[in-house]
Image: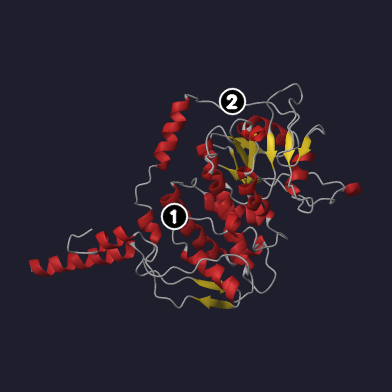
Amino acid sequence: MYGCAKMAALAAAAILMASAVGAFQAAPAVRGRRGIISTSTSAPSASSSALAATWSNGQAIQEYKDFLATGKSELEKEDDGPSVIVKCADPSNVNPLTDAINALGSGDDVILKPNEPLPPSLGGRESYPIYITVPPFELKGFIQNLSDEWKARAEDFVFFSGGKICGVVEPTLREFGMCRDAMTQVVVGFSTPPPGSGLGGVAKKPECLACNIGADAQGDEKWAGESQACGKWNGALASRLEGNGIRCKSGFYREWRRAMWERALYDAVWNLVGGVREEPTDHWDVAAYYDMEASDMMWELANGLRGGLAVTLIYGFEDRLFSIAEMRGKDEPCELSDAMFDHQINIFPGQCKMLKEYCNYAKDERGLLQTANVPPVPTQLSELPSPVRQGNLRADGVI
């Protein structure tokens, strides 16, 4: 009797353990309006997200210690004023973000190419914002080639993330030690009209893309997709945007980073899930017809962020992202860009099995991402560190 009970308990424990690592998880498939159009033929792989979430990551603790060391409990806000806007050195490469930031100013900004002499003062201030509007795939070269004059002004730089134009620049900034509380960073929650789209051939003024999604339990308004800023010049940027009817939330770097990765989740998932379709698909279509695929991929990536980058997205992120697609996604095409692949899609830690399956389908079957370095679909446990494979799965005590 005791032996049977013991065997049953062991069997139940084995099933629970297998479920925890995803042994019974079906291989994701690319689902469409006409049914399944692509299915993985590889063996079901153990999900890295459950394991990654349990690995110790001291980054979040260290960031919190750094925050406490500043002794600041409230944001310091600088006023807006004349600023420098840095455009691409190549005149043929016009970034709509450059015109957007200029259009939001008062007409007294100075537009410069990288390493051109900086004004000694603007608007009576020796310190002023320097908006970096070069594309993310040019950002590393821009930072590497900074002159001494520009390096000395690095604390005044303002970097942008979010959307098809700005993508994710955190890996580049982190490489140069520029991801910190004092550095000004912005999540773009406004439109970036193409040059010449306004009356008289001038740039059309950006519009707010924030979505009011109702009230919370306390009766306060809930918003999705709003601009967010952190760092030294967060107040100046917020003032510039709000003066043009664009919502902007200011916060400390730790809070801003969670909002940035939430936006990165939307940009990657919606463009990838919709971009592999044979028929033209916009963001609203993804929310309406491919919601299960988008939700599955979002949670896979969100779990990877928690384990790989110590980023836990704010509660309700799925509802906010679907609201953006439903309220702002009509006629917003789902697009996959080779140039932006490493700044919009190939940016998430962990195995990202579903994301990589879609990327390989896009390249092999749809003829997209032909010049992008698309990573292969991971096989079972292939991307887990070897000590974890040996130590956790061997019974002889050898690690």
The amino acid sitting under disc 2 is Glu
Task: Answer left or right for 168 relative to 47.
Answer: right
Q: Which residue is mark 2?
A: 76
The amino acid sitting under disc 1 is Asn
Q: Which residue lies most toward the right here?
A: 200
Give the mark nearer the N terminus: 1 vs 2.
2
Task: Answer left or right for 194 relative to 273.
Answer: right
The image quarter containing residue 51 is: bottom left
Q: Which mark is residue 234?
A: none
Q: Secondary structure at mark 1?
A: helix
Q: Residues within 10 Å of mark 1 (few under 14, many from 20)?
A: many
The CA distance from mark 1 to mark 2 is: 33 Å
Percent from the top left, x then y, of residue 79? 69, 26
Q: Residues within 10 Å of mark 2 (few under 14, many from 20)?
A: some
Quick one: quadrant of the N terminus?
Answer: bottom left
Point 21% across, 68% down: residue: 11
* 87 to 274, vertically: above or below: above
* 207 to 181, vertically: above or below: below
Q: Which residue is mark 1?
A: 303
* 189 to 6, vertically: above or below: above
Nearest to the observer: residue 136 or residue 354: 136
The image quarter containing residue 304 is: bottom left
Q: Which residue lies most toward the top here?
A: 124
The image quarter containing residue 22 is: bottom left
Q: Secondary structure at mark 2?
A: loop
Point 44% across, 37% down: residue: 63
Task: Answer left or right for 25 relative to 165.
Answer: left
Name the image colouring.
secondary structure
Percent from the top left, x then y, of residue 283? 65, 60
Residue 206: tell me if it is visible. no
